Image (cartoon, rainbow, N blue to C red):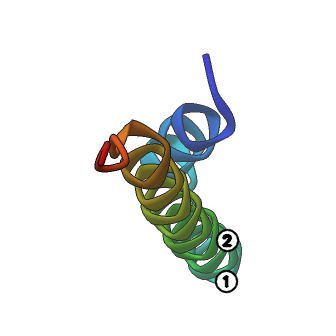
Amino acid sequence: MNALEYLKTHLKYEKNPRLKEGITQKFTDYLRRVEEIRDVLEALCAQSVQIPNKK
């Protein structure tokens, strides 16, 4: 289970609106970072997969 799943579960059962807002903010921050890391890794994989032209 990753951190986003823990936050999502905790968010589901949290009753305090102030804590819920903080958890939601942390969740969106983590999600944004995960998407940025995924994009960087996909770009690196695309670069390494390209086969140079043989002449």
Q: Residue at x 43, y 61 (%)?
A: 43
Q: Which mark is residue 26?
A: 2
Q: Which comes before the other along the chain, label 2 or label 1?
A: 1
Q: Position of residue 51 (x, y in %)?
A: 33, 40
Q: The residue under label 1 is which amino acid type?
A: Arg
Which of these two is toward me, 49 or 17? 49
How many circles with numbers are drawn on the protein? 2
Q: Nearer the viewer, residue 46 or 17?
A: 46
Establish if 30 lies above or below 54: below
Residue 7 vertical position relative to residue 28 in the rendered view, above or below = above
Q: Which amino acid, by three-letter code, is at mark 2?
A: Lys
Residue assigned mark 1:
18
Q: Residue at x 36, y 50 (%)?
A: 46
Dot 1 surroundings within 10 Å: few (below 14), some, or many (20 or more)? Answer: few
Q: Nearer the viewer, residue 9 or 41?
A: 41
Label 1 element class: helix
* Picture coordinates of residue 35, whole percent (x, y): 45, 63
Q: Which residue is painted at 63% across and 64% down in the image?
A: 30
Q: In which quadrant of the rendered image does the N terminus lie?
A: top right
Name above or below for residue 32 compared with residue 46.
below
- Please, which residue is most extreme toward the top here? 1
Q: Provide residue 4's location: percent of width, then percent of height.
A: 57, 43
Left or right, 27 with reference to 8:
right
Secondary structure under the numbered disc 2 in the rendered image: helix
Q: Do tag 2 and tag 1 residues touch (Cβ < 8 Å)?
A: no
Q: Judge the density around disc 2: few (<14), some (14-19), many (≥20) Cα neighbours within 10 Å.
A: some
Q: Which mark is residue 46?
A: none
Q: Residue at 60% across / 80% down in the picture?
A: 25
Q: Is residue 2 left or right of residue 52?
A: right
Q: Position of residue 39 (x, y in %)?
A: 43, 63
Distance between the Cα atoms at labels 2 and 1? 13 Å
